[in-house]
Image (cartoon, rainbow, N blue to C red):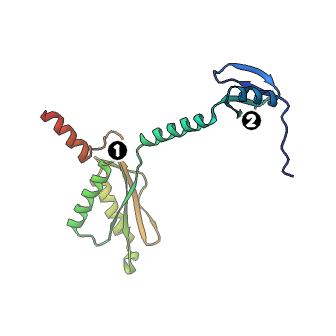
Amino acid sequence: MNERIRVREVRVIDDTGQQLGIMPPQQALTIARQKGLDLVEIAATATPPVCRIMDFGRYQYQEQKRARSAKKHQKIIEVKEIKFRPKVDEHDYQFKKKHIERFLADGDKVKATIFFRGREMAHPEIGRRILERLIEDLTDVAIPETSPRQEGNQMHTILSQKAGKKPATTKKESGESRQATED
């Protein structure tokens, strides 16, 4: 049942972008071989199918190069997680809040989690108050993507950087700009 469907005619475009017209696939392949290039099907669903005469190896290389370039210029946003307990001390809360501010300044998202154990599960309102206080304290730098919600023995919210805020420069970048101003 692995039968190939024979196409009677294909529309051919040469290596300069000129249309050569509609012809049998064998004739198009002969023209491609004479030029030392490949015949590549670029639109199989068209009627008749469209084929292009090109150097397929070079085409693949250019596509890989474009993909690498696009990947290089994109910012990967990570989700960092900060865990709190319902009995969190004030100093621990402030310390973790500063970490969240730093993560947000770096352009990452933060998942703030309250972890309940044992009898703490009977009082989820304590965890909700902590998360709501955190959201309130970070209103100038962060917006909550989700409201605090409980899943099992954890309650969490996700915070992201406010749209108007720009990510802070990294240590490397700030060091380079400092050297440029000194010169």
The amino acid marked with disc number 1 is Lys
Residue 81 or residue 154, whichever sits in front? 81
Residue 171 or residue 141, whichever sits in front? 171
Left or right placement of residue 14 versus residue 176 in this view: right
Instruction: Give coordinates of residue 150: x percent, y percent.
Output: 44, 66
Q: Earlier in the sequence, mark 1 or mark 2?
A: 2
Residue 88 or residue 78, whichever sits in front? 78
Q: Quadrant of residue 154?
A: bottom left
Q: Nearer the viewer, mark 1 or mark 2?
A: 2
Image position of 155 with respect to 139: above or below: below
| Secondary structure at numbered mark 1 | loop
Instruction: Give coordinates of residue 29: x percent, y percent.
Output: 76, 30
In the drawing, what numbered circle is on residue 162?
A: 1
Left or right placement of residue 110 versus residue 70 in this view: left
Image position of 139 with respect to 88: above or below: above
Left or right placement of residue 77 versus residue 51 in this view: left
Image position of 139 with respect to 38: above or below: below
Residue beneath the point at 42% across and 56% down: 147
The amino acid marked with disc number 2 is Ala
In the drawing, what numbered circle is on residue 44?
A: 2
Residue 148 or residue 45, whichever sits in front? 45
Image position of 116 with respect to 104: above or below: below
Instruction: Give coordinates of residue 162: x percent, y percent.
Output: 34, 44
Residue beneath the point at 36% across and 41% down: 163
Instruction: Give coordinates of residue 181: x percent, y percent.
Output: 15, 34
Q: Residues within 10 Å of mark 1 (few under 14, many from 20)?
A: some
Left or right placement of residue 33 versus residue 122 in this view: right
